[in-house]
Amino acid sequence: MMNLEWLRTFKTIYEEGTLTATANKLYISQPGVSLHLGSLEAYIGEKLFDRVSKKMIPTEKGKILYNSISPSLNDLMGVERQFQRTIQSEIPTITLGMCFETFQITLEKHMHKLDFNLVNRFSDYKQLLSELEKGITDVVITPHKSDTKGIVYKHIMTEKISLIGSKDINALELQLIIKTKDNKKILEWLMAQKWYGASSDNEHFVRFWQANFNKNPDFRQNYIVPNFLSIISSLKHGSGIAIVPDFLCYDAIANKEIQLLWQGNQKITNQIYFAYRKNSIYEEQIEQLLKLFKHQA
């Protein structure tokens, strides 16, 4: 099915003459403009523009399409303006990709301070980085880096994968066992506890086990919940232990709602990056987001 945004982008390219001018007018990235045009040309099966010294010269097929859709699109845009405050069309919109837990901890309570529109996307890091490269998203918060040229990665924090527990867990008993450096006894203590896990991410659990016991965990967690924040919430009210990134539970530990039990003999860390495309038209907004994330880290 033909996407209306493809047609809006096509019409603007036709009228503005360059991809850069189109991106500025529509408040989207230049890669996003190229993606819309490429999708429309693939759908139609013919080129709509020729590139001449960075200018976009419409082909005969492009001229026919423009003349066919222009009146209808003008009418639709008139309706849009009628039902939308003028100021909204002047505010840039940034698309930000990250995991849901990071959003809740670092951004959710601060969005009202931003002077631009923000669309939050939640998916796996591979998908989000792919969308960043294609211009679908403008910023991604990620522990992974790609080798794609044109993507800038700025370090914002280091997370430590940690064993946490509910208030009733005997932390001193565990510490005394850990001091013996007897992995068999440590495992016996761990296996005697009730375990919480996240259906959204099992990677941290496996890495912690491999680093400290040189094997994969050979048991199932007792309770599987939607995400890490659900684990933390569950431990505030129930009894058990779990392995989570430490930055997600700073407040709960400080408020003595849960306990930090162990970060392992072999500490597992992830470097978290703020990733965006070079020469973005949203440099001012991206810098504002970067400062916000660094402040929260």
Image (tube, rainbow, N blue to C red):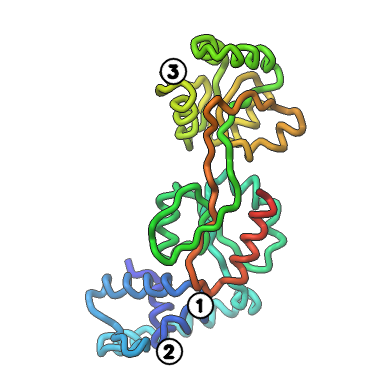
What residue do we see at 56% from left, 26% from top? 264
- Closer to the chain start, of discs 2 and 1, is 2
Q: Is residue 100 above or below residue 72?
A: above
Label 3 sits on residue:
219
Label 1 sits on residue:
26
How far apart marks 3 and 1 lie (CA) works out to: 52 Å
State which mark lies toward you, 2 or 3: 3
Q: Position of residue 195 (x, y in %)?
A: 54, 21
Secondary structure of the residue carrying numbered label 2: helix
Q: Position of residue 47 (x, y in %)?
A: 25, 80
Q: Position of residue 7 (x, y in %)?
A: 39, 77
How far apart marks 2 and 1 lie (CA) works out to: 12 Å
The residue lying toward the viewer, choosing from 163 and 17, is: 163
Please tell me in which quadrant of the rendered image residue 259 appears. top right
Say if mark 2 contacts mark 1, CB within 8 Å: no
How many dots with numbers?
3
Secondary structure of the residue carrying numbered label 3: loop
